[in-house]
Image (cartoon, grey):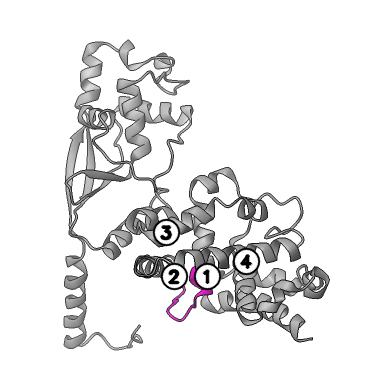
Amino acid sequence: MAARSKDRPTIEQVEAAEEQIVQQSKRIDFFLTEYSVELLAQKIHDEEYVVPVYQREYTWEDRRKSRFIESLLMGLPIPFIFFWEMPDGRLEIVDGSQRLRTIEEFIHGDLELGELDPLTHLSGFRFSDLPASRQRKIKNRSVRGIVLNEHADEAARFDMFERINTGSKIANHAEIRRGALAGPFLDVVSELANSPLLIQLAPMQLKAKKERGYEELVTRLFAYGDGLETYRDRPSDFLFSYSKKMNEAFAADPTLADKYRQRFFAVLEFISQNFPFGFRKTEKSKATPRSRFEAIAIGVDGALAEQPKLADCSASEVGVTSWINEPEFLDITSSDGANAVARLHGRIDYVKNKLVERVGD
């Protein structure tokens, strides 16, 4: 990034800035539209919209469904539905599947409204219980949509998804990558994310699991382990570029899949044998801090690559217990500035050096 000058921008700087705006704008190609509730419900019912595998499961609890339908009945504005226009012309739902499926369940299914406030008299109602005039009014309501068309490149799609994500909880980075970059590398990531040993060593809350938390951990292990030369303190950009590159590499060389599987399980087996609580802070911990996972997993990965004979050492020879609970390790694995490249290198190298030193003793 160019250093800021105390003087006002020159004509050349203004022209360069304008050219950059024009070039970046060309990468975003979308249009706005409106759909009636009736049309949206029918298309979901007829499975004309694509709900991709990376989207969350239908996770809204009954109370949230009821509150959403209450908002619809009251005529409150409904947030944009976000689509991607696929090359075959179908629309893939990127954000809004929970809302759309709730609308479909209410109009075409048997969704019964729970306790409402302020529409208390509608508690327990189904769509079929409403008078025909009210049913028509509901179906006639419109919902706005944003459609990013097929000509936008993958980076532009990701950027737009991420920017929409900053305003509300839509799709996390693992889900976004899965949607925008489906391919052989991410297929392996998804497979390894379901490994029983990973789940045992790195416990995770149910919500984080459903939001592809394990896929995020696996991707970080490989991406950071393969090198941070192009990392610029923005994990989402780095992991997106890495996943795209690795999809291409896996497609060109199918043998890479087994190599990465072997590498993954070598790391987990070593951790299982030498780290008392796996990636957890304590024996009873029910969550895995991401910075702690990165330090241990990627540090072990680097140590095994540098000193393969580590895998044959006993737990007493490896000596993890001599430093794993020391203030220094706890400090470098704190969340403060966790994504800064210096902090990232610091916690990974700390574990790697501790392990390699033991072999050299």
Point out residue 60 in the picture as x, y percentages from the top left corner.
45, 34
Label 2 or label 3, whichever lies nearer to me, is: 3
In the image, is residue 236 above or below residue 63?
Answer: below
- Real-space Cα separation, disc 2 to disc 3, in angstroms: 20 Å
Q: Is residue 228 magenta?
A: yes
Question: Label 3's element?
Answer: helix
Mark 2 or mark 4: whose residue is earlier in sequence: 2
Q: Is residue 85 magenta?
A: no
Label 1 or label 3, whichever lies nearer to me, is: 3
Label 4 or label 3, whichever lies nearer to me, is: 4
Question: Label 2's element?
Answer: loop
Question: Label 4's element?
Answer: helix
State the residue position of label 1. Answer: 339
Considering every residue shown, the one lying at the far front of the view is 255
Residue found at x 66% / y 72%:
332
Which three-letter amino acid code belongs to the residue tagged 4? Answer: Ala
Question: Which mark, residue 234?
Answer: 2
In the image, is residue 145 above or below residue 225?
Answer: above
- Can I make out residue 292 in this image? no
Q: Is 320 displayed left or right of 72 in the figure?
A: right
Asked if labels 2 and 1 touch by Cβ distance under 8 angstroms, the answer is yes
Asked if labels 3 and 2 touch by Cβ distance under 8 angstroms, the answer is no
Please state which of residues 101 and 120 is positioned toward the viewer in this rendering. Answer: 101
Which three-letter amino acid code belongs to the residue tagged 2? Answer: Arg
Residue found at x 32% / y 62%:
159
